[in-house]
């Protein structure tokens, strides 16, 4: 179960898994000094100023929030990447995963559970049905296209966020064929991973949650193992 906690009253240890929602439109000047050389170099490579600002806020917020779990200064946190690029804290046992889309970021943090998080803004111009036909599994397509047409767009982004969260939890990026697993399509059924035919991963090893993100977005969390202690914190801009 996901419990919403006011931004001023959360504490590490209060829940097994935290998901923080934050605005990417905050002032990047408040975060730039927290980033390391590599992050600053990445920020400089964005073509659009708006993307540069959002990147700085996303990575600054990540450092700021993780510092409260690790009790290190944000600027002192060190990151490394696993084989397929998933970032981890170098010398800390906390798991985390970051996602950003549109004007919002999500950061998921857990002490014991590997996890993946995803937020997707609904893009009106995305050719959702064509993407679904190409990338979703056969059962997902069957359920999606059986929905009334007016519900298909939102269902598409719900499935997309859930599939991304699975990929990000496992951490292997697009090495994982998108058709080798099925997620729940329907809004009124519990989120879940129904099939996973990838290496020796078991679908039952993962729990999936729909996140209460703003209208116009879908968000999903995938956690290794079971937990009924998930805290959702909306950081004020
Ligand atoms: C990273 C990846 C796994 C997700 O990217 P995305 O959904 O575009 O972006 P998100 O904002 O959700 O996540 C990006 C963050 O995930 C983290 N990340 C990077 N590689 C990762 C990996 N292999 N596993 C988990 N997390 C990863 C990073 O913190 C990254 O943030 P940064 O780029 O600012 O450093 C991407 O490489 C990918 O493979 N995307 C699949 C795209 C696709 O076709 N999806 C169709 C679904 S139906």
Image: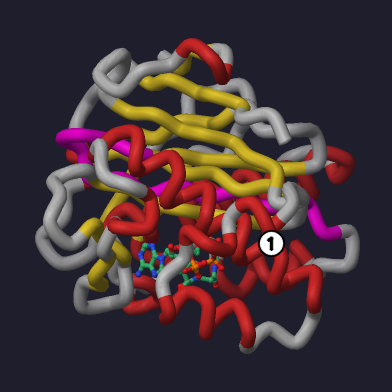
Q: Is residue 206 visible?
A: no
Which residue was labeled with disc 1?
Answer: 54
Q: Tell me: 99 left or right of 165.
A: right
Q: Tell me: 237 left or right of 170.
A: right
Q: Which residues are magenta?
A: 109-123
Q: Tell me: 148 left or right of 221.
A: right
Q: Secondary structure at mark 1?
A: helix
Q: Identify which residue, 68 or 1, lies in the foreground.
A: 68
Q: In this picture, is 42 found above or below 6?
A: below
Residue 146: x, y in percent? 70, 44
Residue 187: x, y in percent? 63, 29
Would you identify the image quadrant in which residue 176 lies? bottom left
Say if the magenta span includes residue 164.
no
Q: Tell me: 22 left or right of 60.
A: right
Q: Identify which residue, 25 or 104, lies in the foreground.
A: 25
Q: In this picture, is 197 found above or below 6?
A: below
- For image coordinates 32% across by 53% down, the residue present is 169
- For image coordinates 38% across by 50% down, the residue present is 74
């Amino acid at each position: 179960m996901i419990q919403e906690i006011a931004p001023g009253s959360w504490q590490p240890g209060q829940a097994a898994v935290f998901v923080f929602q934050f605005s990417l439109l905050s002032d990047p000047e408040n975060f730039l000094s927290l980033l390391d050389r590599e992050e600053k170099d990445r920020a400089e490579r964005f073509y659009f100023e708006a993307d540069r600002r959002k990147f700085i806020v996303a990575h600054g917020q990540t450092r700021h929030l993780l510092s409260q779990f690790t009790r290190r200064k944000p600027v002192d946190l060190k990151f490394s990447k696993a084989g397929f690029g998933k970032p981890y804290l170098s010398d800390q046992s906390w798991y985390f995963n970051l996602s950003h889309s549109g004007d919002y970021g999500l950061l998921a943090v857990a002490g014991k559970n590997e996890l993946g998080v995803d937020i997707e803004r609904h893009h009106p111009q995305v050719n959702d049905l064509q993407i679904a036909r190409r990338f979703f599994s056969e059962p997902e397509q069957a359920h999606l296209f059986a929905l009334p047409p007016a519900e298909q767009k939102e269902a598409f982004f719900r499935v997309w966020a859930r599939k991304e969260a699975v990929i990000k939890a496992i951490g292997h990026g697009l090495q994982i064929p998108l058709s080798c697993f099925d997620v729940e399509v329907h809004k009124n059924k519990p989120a879940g991973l129904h099939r996973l035919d990838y290496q020796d991963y078991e679908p039952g090893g993962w729990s999936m949650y729909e996140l209460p993100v703003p209208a116009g977005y879908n968000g999903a969390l995938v956690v290794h193992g079971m937990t009924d202690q998930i805290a959702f914190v909306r950081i004020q801009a």
